[in-house]
Image: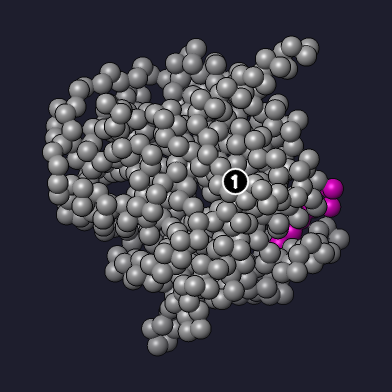
Amino acid sequence: MSEPDILIVGGGLAGLFCALKLAPLPVTVLAAAPVDESSSSLWAQGGVAAAVSEGDSPELHAADTLAAGAGIVDEAVALSVAREARERVEDLLGFGAPFDRDARGRLTPSQEAAHSARRIVRVKGDGAGAAIMHALIATVRKTTSIVLRENFVAEDLIVQSGRVVGVFARGADGASKAFYARATVLATGGVGALYALTTNPPQANGAALAMGARAGARIADAEFVQFHPTAIDIGRDPAPLATEALRGEGAVLVNRAGERFMIALHKDAELAPRDIVARGVFAELEAGRGAFLDATKAVGAAFAEKFPNVAASCLSAGIDPSRQPIPVAPAEHYHMGGLWTDDRGRTSLPGLWAAGEAASTGLHGANRLASNSLLEAVVFGDRIAKDIAALSCRGSAPVLVASAAPAPSGDDADEAKQVRKIMTRHVGVLRDETGLRTALVALKTLHDKALEKNNLDLRNRTEAALLIAASAYLRRESRGGHFRRDFPDSDPAQARRSSITLDEALRLAQGLSETMSGNR
């Protein structure tokens, strides 16, 4: 067995940035797919939130984060992240990120919803994610201390003597391989592929939640799922995104009759927090009135130049956004929950760190502020790198014993579709006790099937979904991205972060299954 090294699971912004910040320490990065094709970071449109303009400040940025997070943001984390933002933007510039600048070379940030200042450092309107990732990928490929292993899907953690010492990952040939490490970082993204309508790539299936929870890690804030209000509703999976920056530029939301419905719902109308806008759009669709993002007046003929990615998605469906409103619908976009971490990115399991959307750091609370996700990825990518580098300078490598690899998993396409249908129908934009109970029972049945078939992929999907649904069932109030029809108000007594284990979620689902069976 080779000497343990540093293992990063995930080829998005958090994973690659962490790997670069660890150089020249040897790092292996596992990516579920080619890194230049399919990470959520690559598709991010808005940019990096950072107080870089005159008159703005980290304190104002933190205050906006607290307001959007609906009462459960960790204030110390929000302030420290905001204060590190400028330095991390400078890091990205150093890695080649081509952020927009004016004629004098100054960064030219844009406005997004719920920000009190123009602080979204972006690239050509809606191209930040792709531009940042292409710059980082090029740098990673030139960095000799980083070994990039693409098309390896992590399925389970390797735990020995209570410590995480690596992962089992399945290659393109279907065989599972053990990757051992002194330090393991999970940066595998979010949970979008658990929902039928999402803006996330297929690899974002909640595997980090399941793997970590199965090993005993603490899961935090799992009920808080953010639905982007303006996914472009043209029947594509994943759904392309109409960036929030469009609304920052003055685009408005209208129904089929041309009425601006957000004016009656919030003082900030289209620039209200995402959860409120998503519910507003959902209500119009549910009532049969349709929902459209109209940028014909605010952007008009300049649309293709200012927002080329959105324009391309619309034109591919026969919609000219410079002259026509864009049909939109809420789609799963970001998970505020994840593996609980401290302010250094350490999970509750020794040897395991988490970064990016796989983690729950306390920054986002119940509702992520626009463009704080890319910021969190680089801030915690940097913190984890520093923490691991400090630890690698002392202590001996753990003594490892070879672990048996899991058996090949069978095809689970039909069951995966069932998970997506259950989550969208019952654990989506609007929730209630009846629907959540139905979801938990159905997911437990699918989980039992995964165990019978020894199918790790389906097991990961169902366990991640169970953690989200159980947390949503237990929070009997509405807050941020979690809205209960049966408890539509926020309860001050519940203004705290949540925590759940996999055993707790399974026991809840089993109890509900037995109760429903007994009532038949």
Tell me the quarter of the image containing the N terminus: top left
Q: What residue type is labelled 1?
A: Phe
Q: Please state if 453 lies on the left or on the right of 153 as rendered.
A: right
Residue 241 within the segment the image draws in magenta: no
Q: What stretch is highlighted in magenta?
A: 287-293
Residue lying farthest to the bottom in this orientation: 104
Q: Please state if 42 lies on the left or on the right of 116 as rendered.
A: left
* Crowding near the residue tagged with mark 1, few <14, some 14–19, many ≥20 C-alpha atoms within 10 Å: many
Query: 9 or 250, which is in the foreground?
Result: 9
Residue 292 within the segment the image draws in magenta: yes
Q: Is residue 287 above or below residue 311?
A: above
Q: Is residue 224 above or below residue 105?
A: above
Residue at figure coordinates x 61%, y 32% from the top left: 470
Q: Please state if 486 lies on the left or on the right of 427 as rendered.
A: right
Q: How many marks?
A: 1
Residue at figure coordinates x 38%, y 59% from the top left: 379
Percent coordinates x, y for residue 341 in the rendering: 41, 46
Residue at figure coordinates x 36%, y 17% from the top left: 407
Report the magenta stretch's main SS: loop
Percent coordinates x, y for residue 346 in the rendering: 35, 46
Percent coordinates x, y for residue 419 in the rendering: 60, 29
Tell me the quarter of the image containing the C terminus: top right
Percent coordinates x, y for residue 248 in the rendering: 62, 71
Determine if residue 395 is in view. yes
Label 1: state its secondary structure: loop
Q: Name the residue under label 1.
A: 224
Query: 446 or 316, which is in the foreground?
Result: 446
